[in-house]
């Protein structure tokens, strides 16, 4: 099912969470990013168009500055993201350049998606970048967003992006293999849902825990993303970005994941 879903999609939005981008010590992982860029370039050579939604501004900020780690104050957090976003893009840019691919940055907020003129411009920019073989890399504009105008997590941001760009598939890469009926880290007998067609039924059969350590999302925001895109006829794949060569393995059907079928 996963291999078929990827094979049938031409326009793919891939979201990478902070946990996937970060090493265990909380600093960003350039080796991961280089390896990922290589796999994306292979997909592009195979005719796919890719838009990336990348978290990690805060993680990259902490990696760069080595201080403010414990500051919870919003001004420090926004300042950290301003610093980290540059580092993040610098690393993405270097990773993709190895394969002759340029990247373009879009930093968005919830308000941007609510305004017709802005969405039209975002859409046009995305189409132009992709047509020219550039990989757009999107993140929330953390330094200007505050509670009221914030999307808050990149699962929902990537869903809005997939809808805006009329993608064929959204892939959310996380540190889990997919949706389980209970936490697989606590329960070895947890069962992976490979295919989901009824989100309401799924919700009633799983226990949703809290969010992970570096990112903002948890399983709840992933289900919200699935609700958004599948309503627009876009399937979503939730898979583990921590496995070696995961894009290849997912494409050839040797890695598990959860596919949310389009409605
Ligand atoms: N925009 C945040 C960052 O780049 C991450 C949001 C998320 O993890 O979902 O640090």
Image (spheres, rainbow, N blue to C red):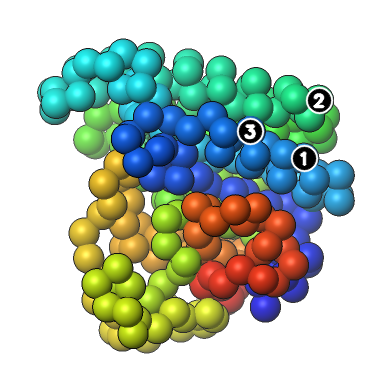
Residue at image mark 3: 34
Q: Position of residue 183 (x, y in %)?
A: 28, 72
Classify the position of the C terminus by image quarter: bottom right
Q: Answer with mark 2 or mark 3, whichever residue precedes in sequence.
A: 3
Near-viewer residue (190 or 79): 190
- For the question of whether residue 104 can be seen, the reply is no
Chain-order first, disc 2 or disc 1: 1
Q: Secondary structure at mark 3?
A: helix
Query: Which residue, given by chain and number where applicable, does mark 2 sit on?
Result: 100
Q: CA distance from mark 2 to mark 3?
A: 13 Å
Spatial CA span between label 3 and label 1 = 11 Å
Identify whether 111 is placed above or below 223. above
Asked if the residue at tag 1 contacts the one at tag 2, i.e. Cβ–Cβ closer than 8 Å, the answer is yes
Residue shown at 29% from the left, 84% from the top: 204
Q: Residues within 10 Å of mark 2 (few under 14, many from 20)?
A: few
Looking at the rendered structure, the secondary structure element under dot 2 is: loop
Whichever of labels 3 and 1 marks the residue nearer the N terminus, that label is 3
Q: Residue at x 70, y 28 (%)?
A: 96
Q: Residue at x 78, y 49 (%)?
A: 43
Establish if 176 lies above or below 44: below
Q: Which mark is residue 41?
A: 1
| Residue 125 shown left or right of residue 208 in the figure | right
- The location of residue 50, given as percent across then percent down, is 70, 44
């Amino acid at each position: 099912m996963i291999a078929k879903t990827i094979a049938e999609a031409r326009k793919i939005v891939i979201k990478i969470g902070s946990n996937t981008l970060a090493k265990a010590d909380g600093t960003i992982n350039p080796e991961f990013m280089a390896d990922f860029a290589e796999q994306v370039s292979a997909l592009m050579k195979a005719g796919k168009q890719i838009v990336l939604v990348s978290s990690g501004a805060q993680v990259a900020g902490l990696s760069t500055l080595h201080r403010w780690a414990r500051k919870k104050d919003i001004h420090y957090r926004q300042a950290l993201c301003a610093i980290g976003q540059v580092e993040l893009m610098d690393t993405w840019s270097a990773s993709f350049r190895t394969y002759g691919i340029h990247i373009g940055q879009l930093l968005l907020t919830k308000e941007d998606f609510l305004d017709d003129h802005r969405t039209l411009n975002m859409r046009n920019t995305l189409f132009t970048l992709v047509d020219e073989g550039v990989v757009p890399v999107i993140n929330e504009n953390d330094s200007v967003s505050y509670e009221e105008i914030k999307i808050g997590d990149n699962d929902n941001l990537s869903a809005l992006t997939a809808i805006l760009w009329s993608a064929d598939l959204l892939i959310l890469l996380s540190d889990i293999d997919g949706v389980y009926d209970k936490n697989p880290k606590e329960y070895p007998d947890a069962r992976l849902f490979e295919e989901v067609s009824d989100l309401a039924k799924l919700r009633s059969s799983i226990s949703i825990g809290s969010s992970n350590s570096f990112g903002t999302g948890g399983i709840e925001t992933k289900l919200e993303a699935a609700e958004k895109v599948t309503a627009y006829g876009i399937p979503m794949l939730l898979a583990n970005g921590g496995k070696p060569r995961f894009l290849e393995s997912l494409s050839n059907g040797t890695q598990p994941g959860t596919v949310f079928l389009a409605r």
